[in-house]
Amino acid sequence: MERTLLVIAPHPDDAELGCGGTLALAASQGWRVVILDLTRGEMASNASPEEREAEARQAARLLGVAERHCAGLPDGQLEAASSLRQVVAAVRSHRPQILMGPYHRDRHPDHQVAGQLLPRAAHLAGLPRYRVPGEPWRPRVILQYFINEHTHPQVLVDVSGVHHLKRKALATYRSQFCPRGRRVTVLNRPAYLQYILARDRYFGALRGVEAAEGFMMAGGWWVDDLDVFLGRGGRPD
């Protein structure tokens, strides 16, 4: 059966910031990686939605992402009900073993909404009577990635070998992270990306590797193969 990883991102660039290395690693190992951006990021201080979409497409190609879609929900106004149906539909359509979304205690309200709805969306996606198109499906693992805030991670993924791809993907978002000719924001000050990359190095140092990305578990493991669970399949920390 094809292995699929579905990532829910409130805005273009959120997936790359939080788990870009993991996406590149998964793609390199034969996983089908899909990103669903819930909004077009139209409330950003810099760039049009069209410019952000072009940057997102380029970043996805660099990471080896198979598909990237946008739900077109209103940026800055994500609500649980509309977002929930979009995520359930995506889960049923792509049938992922792993579902990822942002850490729900992030300071951005859209990140909070997306993170909080993950367990409920995964549950409803498996109920035959829930009225969203597609056959019922439930992910095996639900993980939350960090964007602006972090805590001690429950899961660490070694991304040392693909970290250069994450850096390249982030570099495609020139409208957000490069201040030249743009309105100065928190995101395009050098310290912001320095924090993201330093966090990866810190998480790596926890396990003696160059770089790692950390996750919190929003759902338990579904294990039917202990060799996979204790070997290459990983385990909770």
Image: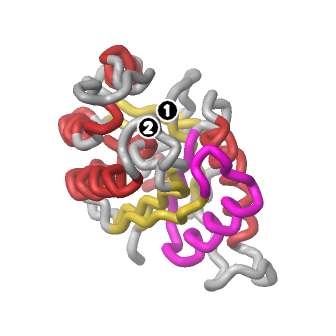
Residue 94 belongs to the span the image colors magenta? yes
Which portion, as a residue range, is magenta? 74-102
Indicate whether 180 appears above or below 115.
Answer: above
Left/right placement of residue 188 relative to residue 160 reads right
State the image coordinates of residue 172 (x, y, percent, origin top left): 23, 43
* Label 1: which secondary element: loop
Q: Residue furthest right?
A: 129
Q: Residues within 10 Å of mark 2 (few under 14, many from 20)?
A: many
User: Are the residues at dot 2 and dot 1 in contact (C-beta closer than 8 Å)?
Assistant: yes
Q: What residue do we see at 31% from left, 29% from top?
A: 182
Residue 161 belongs to the span the image colors magenta? no
State the image coordinates of residue 127 (x, y, percent, origin top left): 76, 76
> Is residue 27 visible to us here?
no
Q: What residue do we see at 35% from left, 18% from top?
A: 189
Q: What residue do we see at 67% from left, 59% from top?
A: 83
Residue to which mark 2 is pinned: 18
Q: Earlier in the sequence, mark 2 or mark 1?
A: 2
Is 84 in front, or is 231? 84
Q: What residue do we see at 59% from left, 60% from top?
A: 73
Indicate whether 123 appears above or below 10.
Answer: below
